[in-house]
């Protein structure tokens, strides 16, 4: 019988130290960009309208309330903004780091049921300049982690406008959304036939999965844009890209779904030979405009390979005063618990120095 639940795991010292170091790199970067740290509770009230409600771990509180373990951060930060930061001036630049839990995940490392995210939210503004800031910050975040990446950008508002040109009711559009997002072209064509979508709308919807590539995709998208809303979505995307200071993006104008709350530009980052996104985010409007992104830390670690070798202990000290002296000098230092066997212990562990009576002595075989 397993001793810990499926999809969770023990984290050993080399990996723990590496994960914390990567987390610290991101937090230092976010702070340098003017973002401030927040923490939200791991336990939340279960909410059937929460975007991850069907996948959340739930439990019953002593008063009968149904609680859920935190399953994503954007909703939780939104609650914090509407309560404790309700009178704070906009824009709010916030960042977070912590554990999330999803009961429907697998036990594969990149899809554990307990995992770590580090991310940011830029709240209270909806300009293209704020979208550009997040695109630029997302790029720098992946650069400080040292991971190779490709950032893909989409706009669900464009997809929605194209789908709505069919005149179909909302209940019929969900299946089309799903087929477009999965780029399931045969399935999409079959659905369009079954729903009797004809003419320019059919041509435009059928073309959505192919609107994938560099900025050269934009002219093709403009040719099929059926409305002012669709054209405005493309304008916004193009402006944000221009303001971000880089054109090294992949446009995925069939990217339409992930979380239902996304209303504007969305993006995600991939690395070669790794099929899961390392970073995802986008713009939303839940009464207060905002946008943000999160990095899956375990996924980034897997993409980077194994942790670096653990930093060895430098000094084995035979008394507390010598240990204090060695640590003050910057050496990683252990206190010998059996001074009589300290030299042999240091040789077996590869520890370079013994510290005794306030001085260091190199350990030789």
Image: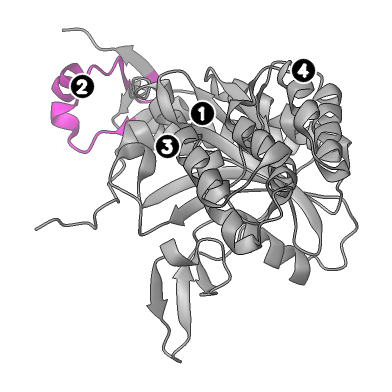
Marks 1 and 2, the one that precedes in the sequence: 1
Residue 345 belongs to magenta span: yes
Q: Which mark is residue 246?
A: 4
**What number is the disc on residue 328?**
1
Closest to the camera, between mark 2 and mark 3, is 3
| Numbered marks: total | 4
Taking the image as shown, residue 165 lies to the left or right of residue 257, namely right
Q: Which mark is residue 298?
A: 3
**Distance between mark 3 and mark 4 Cα atoms:** 27 Å
Please, is residue 158 above or below residue 65 in the view? above
Residue under the image location 22 percent in, 56 percent down: 4
Q: Which residue is mark 2?
A: 349
Which image quadrant is residue 29 in? top right
Question: Residue 88 placed where, x, y %?
Answer: 87, 62
Image quarter in which the C terminus is found: top left
| Sequence-wise first label, 1 or 3 | 3
Q: CA distance from mark 1 to mark 3?
A: 34 Å
Residue depth check, mark 1 versus mark 2: number of the one nearer the observer? 2
At mark 4, the secondary structure is: loop
Q: Secondary structure at mark 2?
A: helix
Question: Picture coordinates of residue 258 (x, y %)?
Answer: 56, 48
Instruction: State whether residue 320 appears in this view.
Output: no
């Amino acid at each position: 019988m397993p001793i810990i639940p499926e999809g969770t795991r023990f984290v050993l010292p080399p990996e723990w130290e590496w994960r914390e170091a990567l987390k610290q790199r991101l937090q230092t970067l976010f702070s340098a960009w003017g973002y401030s740290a927040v923490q939200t509770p791991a336990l939340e009230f279960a909410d059937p309208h929460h975007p991850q409600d069907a996948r959340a771990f739930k439990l019953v509180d002593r008063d009968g309330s149904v609680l859920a373990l935190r399953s994503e951060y954007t909703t939780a930060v939104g609650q914090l903004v509407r309560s404790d930061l309700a009178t704070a001036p906009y824009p709010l630049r916030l960042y977070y780091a912590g554990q999330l839990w999803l009961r429907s995940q697998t036990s594969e490392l990149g899809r554990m049921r307990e995992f770590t995210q580090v991310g940011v939210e830029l709240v209270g503004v909806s300009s293209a300049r704020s979208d550009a800031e997040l695109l630029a910050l997302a790029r720098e975040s992946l650069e400080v982690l040292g991971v190779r990446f490709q950032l893909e950008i989409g706009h669900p508002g464009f997809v929605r406008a194209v789908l709505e040109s069919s005149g179909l009711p909302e209940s019929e559009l969900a299946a089309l959304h799903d087929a477009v997002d999965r780029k399931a072209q045969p399935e999409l064509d079959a659905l369009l036939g079954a729903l009797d979508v004809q003419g320019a709308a059919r041509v435009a919807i059928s073309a959505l999965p192919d609107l994938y590539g560099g900025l050269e995709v934009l002219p093709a998208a403009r040719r099929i844009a059926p409305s002012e809303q669709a054209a405005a979505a493309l304008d916004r995307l193009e402006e944000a890209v221009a303001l971000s200071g880089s054109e090294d993006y992949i446009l995925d104008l069939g990217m339409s779904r992930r979380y239902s709350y996304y209303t504007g530009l969305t993006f995600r980052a991939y690395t070669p030979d790794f099929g899961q996104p390392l970073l995802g985010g986008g713009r939303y409007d839940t009464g207060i405009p905002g946008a943000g992104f999160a990095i899956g830390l375990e996924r980034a670690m897997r993409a980077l390979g194994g942790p670096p070798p653990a930093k060895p202990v430098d000094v084995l000290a035979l008394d507390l005063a010598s240990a204090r002296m060695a640590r003050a000098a910057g050496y990683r230092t252990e206190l010998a618990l059996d001074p009589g066997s300290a030299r042999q212990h240091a040789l077996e562990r590869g520890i370079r120095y013994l510290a005794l009576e306030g001085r260091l002595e190199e350990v030789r075989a």
